Image (tube, grey):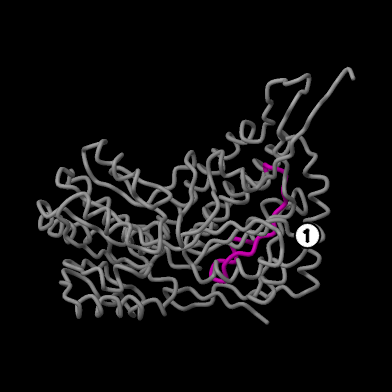
Amino acid sequence: MTLCVINPYDREVVARLAFDSGPRCEAALRQADETFQRWRFTPLDERIAVIRKGLDYFHRQRKIIATEITAQMGKPVRESRNELKGFFERAGYMLEAAPAALAPDVLPVQDGLARMIRHEPLGVVFDIAAWNYPLLIAVNVVVPALAAGNTVVLKHSARTPLCGRHFEEAFRHYPGLINHLVLNHTDTAAVIQDPRVAHVVFTGSVEGGRRIQQVAADRFIGVGLELGGKDPAYVAADADLAMAVPLIVEGACYNAGQSCCAVERVYVHREVYEAFVTQAQVAMRVFRPGPPMDPSTTLGPLADRGALVRLEDQVRDAIARGARLVSGGERCGEDGAFFAPTLLADVPDTADVMQAESFGPILPVQVVADDREALARMNASRYGLTASVWTRSRERVDWLADRLEAGTVYQNRCDYLDPGLPWSGVKESGRGVSLSSYGYHHLTRTKSLHYRTGA
């Protein structure tokens, strides 16, 4: 069988790759397991040096890689270049955090016993990476997993498999550290069930995460899941609209809204509601469809053309329930591969666009009377990835943050991952942690040591 990667903009064939069969999977798992037995005992400073050498490959190939990302999933090339910047930022931070995160915890001597807690690698980590940020999502796992002493088997999305190949090529100087596989669903499940796999990380939809969890249920291994989001923003009466509006609109429309932490619903205090809607309509004009390889293009096509139907349905449903279409709401571009940046006002909670993940450039807005109403509506979701509060008051943010059901809460910021802070979700947005020193916790296991000397 062959995987055919199609450019979502011009429908040209980007690549044809053979799916990896049973023998290839067996070879990859065997090599990953055998390499782990050596790699785990390699001193940390040497592991970091090997990883940095792998990152040098991405520096050398950054222009090619950015172009390939755009060709595979349609992201404007300027955004692909920005993704590379974020890739190096995250990788660099995780390597800097490694010595402290992986150092043994030494406890005070007690009753003549020296005590220590070590953080040991798990083994072979199976990383199933998504397509919307094909470098960032993979590096969140690859760098800390390798630094901790694990090896990685990488299964990249069928939309962006060339990115997975680059990860394997980057570490060819140390064979077995990363093996990339092109897999169908059946073979993906078989890899999860292989006894040599010690941990699985999946980034994708809630439905996909549920299937991964079910496949892994027969084995006593950890599963990290970064799933969907329906991330809310609250614009308080004292918000600086000149700052808030363009940032919220960007949070909804960047990467054509194809982000788990995109702003997908906005609750605006009634005192500034009409002003917000008016300014948001203007701010959306920044995002213009065009050829993704053109550096001036600010809106790319959706990676999945089937998603256009879902977005159209959400707009129709919202209007039928009383929402007001302010702008957009339809396909656009040369052949309808794009969805116009869409602003919906007066959207009721019952509308699908306020409940189900859109994963497109849609911004539904609803008026609220006060902080308590905003809180109730923000928490009224099965998702809980991020939430943003737009206000001049730190006190207001702290009150809301104590009560918001989200893994990350922002003040006057949105749609950003700080590598120094742990990234996690609650409810159906996932389980486990990536980034920061905490990102090493689920990629290691603790071992307790007792030392009695002079007995």
* Residue 109 higher or lower than 141, as above or below: above
Of the 4 image quadrants, the one containing the N terminus is bottom right
User: Residue at horizontal 72%, vertical 39%?
Assistant: 47
* Residue 70 higher or lower than 333, as above or below: above
**Residue 430 in view:** yes
Horizontal side of 442 relative to 418 (left or right) equals right
Of helix, strand and loop, which one carries label 1? loop
Q: Nearer the viewer, residue 28 or 346?
A: 346
* Residue 12 higher or lower than 197, as above or below: below
Q: Quadrant of residue 31?
A: bottom right
Q: Position of residue 166 (x, y in %)?
A: 63, 57
Q: Residue flagged by tag 1: what amino acid is it?
A: Arg
User: Residue at horizontal 14%, vertical 47%?
Assistant: 237
Q: Position of residue 451 (x, y in %)?
A: 81, 26
Range of residues picked out in magenta? 147-164
Disc 1: CA contacts within 10 A as few (<14), some (14-19) or many (>=20) = some
Furthest residue in direction front, as rendered: 111
**Residue 296 in view:** no
Q: Nearer the viewer, residue 90 or 123?
A: 123
Q: Quadrant of residue 324?
A: bottom left
Which residue has dot 1 on it? 196
User: Residue at horizontal 68%, vertical 75%?
Assistant: 19
